[in-house]
Amino acid sequence: MQRNVATETHSTPKSEGRSAIALPADCTIGAIGVLHERLRTAGRGDSLDGSTVQRIDTAGLKLLVAFMHERRAAGSTIAWRGISRVLSEAAQKVGLVEAIRLPSFR
């Protein structure tokens, strides 16, 4: 799913008292360790910032799905603070927008 797409971002309102876990620019299988480590450090009330994601493949999306599923099972939710066009389009292409609770890209 590698494409050269202009990096555009969409920000959602900042949640009070929450810190944002910034996803790496490269969320592909070759760099999955960095994404996994960042998600592993997320606290219960943290949000995700995907505004700098420039590359993401199905491995990166599957890790996000597993992370969100784990959070829902634990009774907590994760909000998105920002998303890139690349992240939005990739999730739409494979039908995972709902699974990772991605807001609409405007």
Image (cartoon, rainbow, N blue to C red):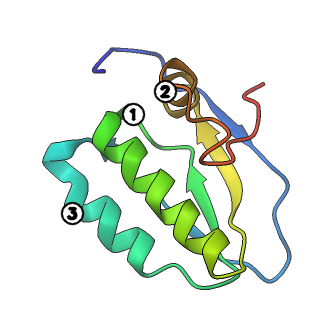
Mark nearer the N terminus (2 vs 1):
1
* Element under disc 1: loop
Earlier sequence position, callout 3 versus callout 1: 3
Residue denoted by label 2: 86
- Amino acid found under the numbered disc labelled 1: Gln
* Disc 2 residue type (three-letter): Val
**Does the residue at mark 2 contact the one at mark 1 (Cβ under 8 Å)?**
yes
Residue 47 position, x and y percent, is 66, 67
Give the secondary structure at mark 2.
helix
Q: What element carries label 3?
A: helix
Question: From what the image shows, is residue 44 above or below residue 33?
Answer: below
Q: Name the residue under label 3.
A: 33
- Residue lying furthest left in this view? 30
- Dividing the picture into quadrants, the one containing residue 29 is top left
Q: Look at 33% across and 60% down and name the residue there.
A: 35
Residue at x 72%, y 28% (from the top left corner): 105
**Which of 64 and 35 lies nearest the eye of the viewer?**
64
Give percent across and percent down for residue 78: 68, 66
To which residue does mark 1 refer? Answer: 54
Q: Quadrant of the N terminus?
A: top left
Residue 25, can we see it? Answer: no
The CA distance from mark 3 to mark 1 is 16 Å
Q: In which quarter of the image is residue 20?
A: bottom right
Q: In this picture, is 76 found above or below 106?
A: below
